[in-house]
Amino acid sequence: RQHSCILAIETSCDETSVAVVKDGHEVLSSVIASQIETHKAFGGVVPEVASRKHVESITLIIEEAVAKAGIDMKDLSAIAVTQGPGLVGALLVGVMAAKSLAFALNKPLIGTHHIAGHIYANRFVGDIEYPCMALVVSGGHTELVYMKDEGSFELIGRTRDDAVGEAYDKVARALGFPYPGGPHVDRMALEAEGVVDLPRVWLEPDSYDFSFSGLKSAVLNVVNQSKMRGEEVRTEAIARGFQESVVEVLVEKAVRAVRAYAAKQLLLCGGVAANRGLRKELSERCEREGISLIIPPFQYCTDNGAMIAAAAHLKWKQGSFTPLDMKADPQMPL
Ligand code: KG4
Ligand code: ZN
């Protein structure tokens, strides 16, 4: 079983996304309806609003993805969907849509883990060599995942407080930028001339865990002190100091994990993998140390349906399908 054509639905947070992917790596269509404009007014994602928006757009997005792929739905091999983790009300919309399609078309259903999707977005670049190490950096997750083999995931490190994307968004907000703030901080950091020195949080010497809430508080303190003293807030220099701290810790721990586990490859993924500072530093470090690194193209770093299809393709190869009575699982383990 090698050739597949999978339609995948991703609605775990604030993007309604549907893609059609051939053989797990050839993207025939990828449609992403972002709700960012709606959530901006609230400064972050409002779960109830997200669910309602997904309901409004899911059918249209499915139709658009099928039309753009130029396929006949009866030729699909399977319907895949993000089963979890994520916002339960948001996940439910995608899961119901996927079940309905699978039932109506009499196709197998494949419930997929959101992080497996982020990791397998790297399949759009090339083949993955095992054993490998994945550095997952998104709005909800910051994890180091060791993969002995295809489809095998061992969590060796995770954030103990804020996810890195969450820290980016909070720092951006303190600096006066709208949600999602990551790209703004990234831009400021690269344009900055000065830099505000901020702490690096390493935790115990042998730990692969992360912590970003102290760094976030340090940024808030610098901002508040400037305001109290009536001084100008050095937005760009703070953004650069924050980004340098985050990138240094992520790169160092990822490289250490690659060495300790004798991984053949390092995979970067998740929304923060779109960060230009991180992409550059990690690429340069891996180049210097002779570590093979893959990073997904920008459009497959943040949430998208294509990555879910890529992960689902592996389950499809094994004939590992999900019963139609499956439930969305907001806390789904990897
Ligand atoms: O993977 P994703 O789309 O959603 C989750 O599964 O969480 O990640 C979204 C996160 C947001 O926190 C956003 O600010 C961050 O990714 N992000 C970035 C950049 N682009 C997106 N963070 C830093 N630099 C960027 N260029
Ligand atoms: Zn995500």
Image (cartoon, rainbow, N blue to C red):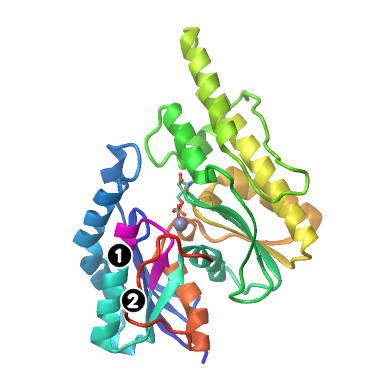
Q: Quadrant of residue 19?
A: bottom left
Residue 123 or residue 110, whichever sits in front: 110
Name the residue rendered at 40%, 42% in the picture: 180
Q: Which residues are magenta?
A: 81-92
User: Which label's residue is closer to the chain start, 2 or 1?
Assistant: 2
Q: 71 left or right of 275?
A: left
* Residue at the spot of label 1: 92
Tell me if residue 220 comes above or below residue 200 in the rendering: above
Tell me if residue 72 comes above or below residue 252 in the rendering: below
Q: Nearer the viewer, mark 2 or mark 1?
A: 1
The three-letter code of the residue at mark 1 reads Leu
Q: Under tag 1, what secondary structure?
A: helix
For label 1, being within 8 Å of ligand 1 is answered no
Q: Which quarter of the figure is the C terminus placed in?
A: bottom right
Name the residue rendered at 33%, 76% in the picture: 69
Residue 69's label in the rendered image is: 2
Q: Quadrant of residue 84?
A: bottom left
Q: 152 left or right of 16?
A: right
Name the residue rendered at 66%, 25% in the picture: 197
